[in-house]
Amino acid sequence: MRNADSRLRAVPIAREEWCALAADFDDLSYRQFPAFVVEASRANGAAPEFVALRAGAEFAGLCALRIKKLPGLPIGLAYALHGPLCMRNGIYSWDLYSDCLRALSDLYVAKRGLVLRVAPPYAVSQDSGAAADAFTRAGFGLTAESPKRTIMLALDRDLAQIRRGLNGKWRNMLVQSERLAIAIAETEDPGDFALMAPMLKELENRKRFRSAHDVAFFERVQRAASPLERLKLHVAYFEGRVVSASLSSFAGKTAVLLLAANNEEGRRTRAAHRIQWRIVEDAVRAGLRWYDTGGIDPDANPGVYSFKKGLNGVELSELGVFERAPHPVLARGVALLETLYRRARALA
């Protein structure tokens, strides 16, 4: 326990030290990977920063942030996606999480005059009331940004139990696919990621949507990744031909699906069912507790929603995005300038 007079401080550290410390955190996800944060920052004209949350010699948490200064103005935004991290040994403390938020505020809001925006990890969403209270105590307010949604499959059972728990129709399609000569290969070589690109492009054109990050983005992330951050690509082959692929991350206690796509032959052979079940198998054997199937949108993309729902996981929503600013007027000004900047980029 910390002394009553001690207070957590956010201390900037090197990327390499951050990675060495991050392996101990159960709430770590790819969204906090330095390789991901660096690439996402580059794409948005921001700068990455990595901090440790300490009270004297005690090390309590970590956070990776993107710092975006608005052009020509002495104001900016510090953004933490699925941070700060503070869950270790299966124990989550709302008091500690709130203290971590205050430490980040001391550095980025009080000292540097930035708007601090935080989208908390899904682990925080397990108890929305306690989480909202933690943000309130740290001086944050909820923004109007729509929360993301996903389906989480619990992996704290043996594989036979998980398989029996699948939706009957989904399980039957898996069985049908298992009767075919489909081979699943796993690779971490970023040069292999291009195998997925044509299928994802065809899917996006057919479904009329765009992924937040494409295959090329994650290929760049993989090339810069440390061993802790390495992503996994599962590729399904039928009679030697690539028919389906999925990209995922195994970090902390959760596997996360990042991208998935089939071609027509993959849809016919139900190869995606084989790959999804293989990811579940690999995650269970790695000792993970959850499989996050990635974003869902039942209205805009009902087919993907139905497929993911077949795993019979739990639908979960992020709490939303919280914000603290040096002054309310500054928060409104940053939001307005962000909107104008996005519109200008869309027209460019």
Image (tube, rainbow, N blue to C red):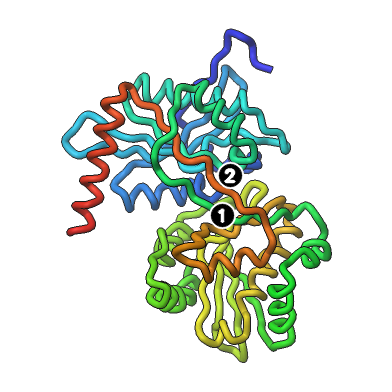
Q: Which residue is mark 1?
A: 150
| Residue for point 83% across, 65% down | 160
Label 2 near label 1: C-beta < 8 Å? yes
- Judged left or right of residue 272, residue 9 is left
Considering depth in this image, is 167 or 82 the residue closer to the camera?
167
Residue 122 tag number: 2
Q: Residue furthest front?
A: 299
Residue 347 visible, this angle: yes
Considering depth in this image, is 252 or 258 the residue closer to the camera?
258
| Residue for point 54% across, 83% down | 242
Residue 230 drawn at (x, y percent): 56, 57
Check the image and report above or below for 292 versus 269. above
For label 2, the SS is helix
Q: Residue furthest top?
A: 5
Which quarter of the rendered picture does the N terminus lie within? top right
For label 1, the SS is strand
Say which amino acid is labelled 2.
Tyr
Q: Quadrant of residue 239?
A: bottom right
- Judged left or right of residue 228, residue 42 is left
Residue 347 drawn at (x, y percent): 18, 58
Residue 187 visible, this angle: no
> Mark 1 against mark 2, which lies toward the viewer?
1
Say which amino acid is labelled 1.
Thr
Which quarter of the rendered picture does the C terminus lie within? bottom left
